[in-house]
Image (cartoon, helix red, strand yellow):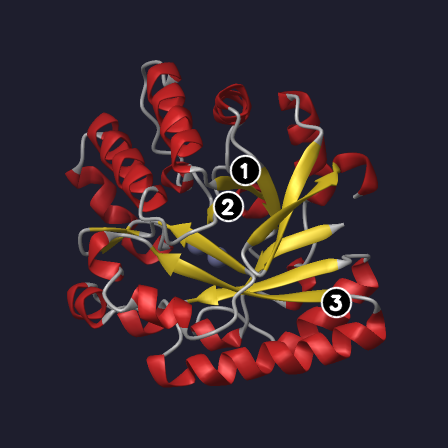
C-alpha cells in the first residue's frame, strides 16, 4: 500500500507527530508514506484569508517540519516504511509568492498543488459554508476548475491534490459536467501533472473519493497519471480507504500509479499495492 498525502499537528488543524504516523503506517501495511504538510501560506494569502493561521504551519517552522520527517524516515527504516518528504502548496496566484524559493530550499520528493481558497474564502472549511449561497454553483465550479488548471500550469507541482474538492459539501451543478471534466483533463495532461486519488472525500459530506468516477474516467482518457493518498489528518487515518481507491482506479481502467522520489515519477502496478 502507498499513501502519498498526510498531515501532522504542524498545520494546526491535524493531530499527531510524524513518528506516530509512521508507526500507524507500519501497523496498517503502508509501505510508502509521503508527508505533505501545508507549505506556510504566503504573506499575501495570509493577509487576505480570515483565520489563515489555522490552515498551515508558520514559516519559521518549515525547517522543523523537514527535520520531523527526517527523524520519521529513520524510524521508518526500522519499521519497514519508506518515508518521503513532501509538501502541499496553495497554488493560487496569491499563494505563490516565495513558493518557488521555499520549494527549492529543501529536497522534496513530491509537491502537491491544491486550491483551498477562492479569493479570500476557504471554501473547504466547514466553518465557512455559508458563503456557498453567494455563488451560482455553476459559476463556482467553473471558477474552481479554472483556478485548478492555472495551478497545474505553474510548473511548480507534481500532483494536483483533491481535484474536485469543490464538491465537498455537496453543492453540485445540475447540468452535465462532461465538457468541464474533459477540458480540465486535457489541460492537466498538457501540463504533465499527475492527479491523486484522494480518499478523504469518503470521510466528508460528499462521501465520495476525489475525483469522482466520471472525472477519473476523463483523466484516464486524456492520459493523466495518478498517485494515491488518504489526506490523513490523524495517525488513525493513514491508509484509510485504500481498497476503495484501488477499486475506483481499476474501474476507470488504470493499471498503475506513480510514486515520486526526488520529484521523479516511478510507476508501480496496482497489483503490487
Ligand atoms: Zn488539501
Ligand atoms: Zn492535504
Kindly report the distance in space between the C-alpha atoms of the residues bearing marks 2 and 3: 21 Å
Q: Which mark is residue 204?
A: 2
Task: From the image, tell me which residue sits under label 1.
Answer: 207
Q: Position of residue 249 (x, y in %)?
A: 65, 30
Q: Quadrant of ligand 1?
A: bottom left
Kindly report the distance in space between the C-alpha atoms of the residues bearing marks 2 and 1: 5 Å
- Residue at x-position 32% and y-position 18%: 174
Using a 10 Å C-alpha cutoff, classify the residue at mark 1 as few (fewer than 14 neighbours), some (14 to 19) or many (20 or more): some
Task: From the image, tell me which residue sits under label 3.
Answer: 24
The foreground one among 83 and 141 is 83
Kindly report the distance in space between the C-alpha atoms of the residues bearing marks 1 and 3: 24 Å
Q: Position of residue 206 (x, y in %)?
A: 48, 37
The foreground one among 98 and 36 is 98
- Residue at x-position 69% and y-position 75%: 73
Q: Which mark is residue 39?
A: none
Q: Is mark 3 within 8 Å of ligand 2?
A: no
- Residue at x-position 57% and y-position 61%: 262
Using a 10 Å C-alpha cutoff, classify the residue at mark 3 as few (fewer than 14 neighbours), some (14 to 19) or many (20 or more): some
Among numbered discs 1 and 3, the one appearing first in the sequence: 3
Q: Is residue 58 visible?
A: yes
Among numbered discs 2 and 3, the one appearing first in the sequence: 3
Q: Position of residue 47 (x, y in %)?
A: 16, 70
Question: Quick check: 208 above or below 154?
Answer: above
Q: Quadrant of the C terminus?
A: top right
Secondary structure of the residue carrying tag 1 is loop
Secondary structure of the residue carrying tag 2 is loop
* Contact? badges 2 and 1 (CB < 8 Å): yes
Amino acid at each position: 500500500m502507498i499513501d502519498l498525502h498526510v498531515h501532522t499537528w504542524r498545520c494546526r488543524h491535524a493531530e499527531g507527530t510524524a513518528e506516530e504516523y509512521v508507526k500507524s503506517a507500519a501497523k496498517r501495511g503502508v509501505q510508502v508514506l509521503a508527508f505533505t504538510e501545508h507549505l506556510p501560506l504566503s504573506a499575501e494569502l495570509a493577509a487576505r484569508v480570515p483565520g489563515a493561521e489555522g490552515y498551515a504551519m508558520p514559516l519559521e517552522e518549515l525547517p522543523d517540519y523537514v527535520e520531523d520527517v527526517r527523524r520519521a524516515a529513520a524510524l521508518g527504516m526500522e519499521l519497514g516504511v519508506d518515508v518521503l518528504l513532501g509538501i502541499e502548496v496553495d497554488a493560487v496566484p496569491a499563494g505563490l509568492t516565495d513558493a518557488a524559493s521555499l520549494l527549492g530550499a529543501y529536497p522534496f520528493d513530491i509537491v502537491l498543488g491544491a486550491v483551498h481558497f477562492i479569493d479570500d474564502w476557504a471554501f473547504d472549511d466547514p466553518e465557512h459554508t455559508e458563503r456557498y449561497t453567494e455563488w451560482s454553483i455553476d459559476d463556482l465550479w467553473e471558477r474552481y476548475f479554472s483556478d485548478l488548471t492555472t495551478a497545474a500550469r505553474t510548473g511548480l507541482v507534481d500532483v494536483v491534490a483533491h481535484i474536485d474538492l469543490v464538491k465537498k459539501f455537496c453543492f453540485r451543478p445540475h447540468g452535465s459536467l462532461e465538457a468541464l471534466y474533459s477540458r480540465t483533463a486535457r489541460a492537466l495532461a498538457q501540463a504533465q501533472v499527475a492527479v491523486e486519488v484522494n480518499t478523504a472525500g469518503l470521510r466528508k459530506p460528499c462521501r465520495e473519493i476525489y475525483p469522482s468516477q466520471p472525472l477519473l474516467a476523463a483523466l484516464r482518457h486524456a492520459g493523466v497519471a495518478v498517485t494515491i493518498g488518504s489526506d490523513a489528518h490523524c495517525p488513525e487515518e493513514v491508509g484509510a480507504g485504500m481498497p476503495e481507491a484501488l477499486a475506483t482506479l481499476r474501474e476507470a481502467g488504470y493499471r498503475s500509479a506513480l510514486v515520486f522520489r526526488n520529484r521523479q515519477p516511478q510507476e508501480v502496478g496496482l497489483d503490487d499495492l
